[in-house]
Amino acid sequence: MEHSKHIWRVFILLAVGVVFVVSGRHFLVPASFGKMGHFRFDSIGEYMAKPVMHGNDASCRKCHQDKYDAHEMGKHAAVRCENCHGPLALHVANGEKSADAQVVRSWELCAWCHQPLQARPKDFPQVDFREHLISEDIPVKGTIPPKICFMCHDPHDPLQE
């Protein structure tokens, strides 16, 4: 009997812990959580209120018809303009050019999609950049020069040399 008071203390501590967790959850979990799934439903409206940053390739065609045509006929036709040039909203605002488009001329941009990875389909063009340069008789000592891919390949139509 003497030890039963220790058991009661444990039960009291557990009860206080449960009350603390339940009341804490009540104050910390937003009211809209779980309304339409396992997320905070109010966040949808918050995201919808943000300005649109991305456009589509047709937005680029208006001013860059020649590049658009080369792109659409080339091997990169499935790659959207913004994948390489950044969000449209950083280049165009209210239908007018607001800044230069991002132009990254680096072999690392090409490597994002073309470096060898086992997870990629076997028919997807994967390039070991050092081996490719050696096979083209381009000497590489140390690091690969940044603009090396663009010396031979047009990024909008990479098979055209």
Image (cartoon, helix red, strand yellow):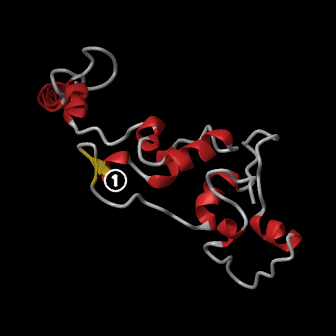
Name the residue nearer the viewer: 43 or 14.
Answer: 43
Q: Is residue 143 above or below residue 76?
A: below
Name the residue type under label 1: His
Q: Splitting the image into 4 quarters, where does residue 132 fall?
A: bottom right
Q: Would you say 60 lies left or right of 3 here?
A: right
Q: Would you say 129 lies left or right of 2 here?
A: right
Query: What is the tally of numbered marks visible in this picture?
Result: 1
Q: Judging from the image, what secondary structure is the residue with disc 1 in?
A: loop
Label 1: how many Cα within 10 Å (few below 14, some 14–19, many 20+): some
> Residue 99 location in percent, x, y?
31, 59
Name the residue nearer the viewer: 86 or 4.
Answer: 86
**Residue at (46, 47) in percent of width and height:** 82
Q: Farthest bottom residue? A: 141
**Residue at (19, 20) in percent of width and height:** 32
Query: In this orientation, does residue 65 appear?
Result: yes
> Residue 77 location in percent, x, y?
63, 39
Q: Check disc 1 and report the residue beneath it.
A: 91
> Residue 142 location in percent, x, y?
71, 84
Q: Would you say 102 lies left or right of 40 here?
A: right
Name the residue nearer the viewer: 153 or 108.
Answer: 153
Q: Is residue 12 above or below residue 124?
A: above
**Residue at (65, 66) in percent of width and height:** 150
> Residue 83 location in percent, x, y?
51, 48
Q: Splitting the image into 4 quarters, where does residue 3 fall?
A: top left
Quarter of the image where the C terminus is located: bottom right
Query: In this orientation, does residue 5 appear?
Result: no
**Residue at (77, 48) in percent of width and height:** 125
Quarter of the image where the N terminus is located: top left
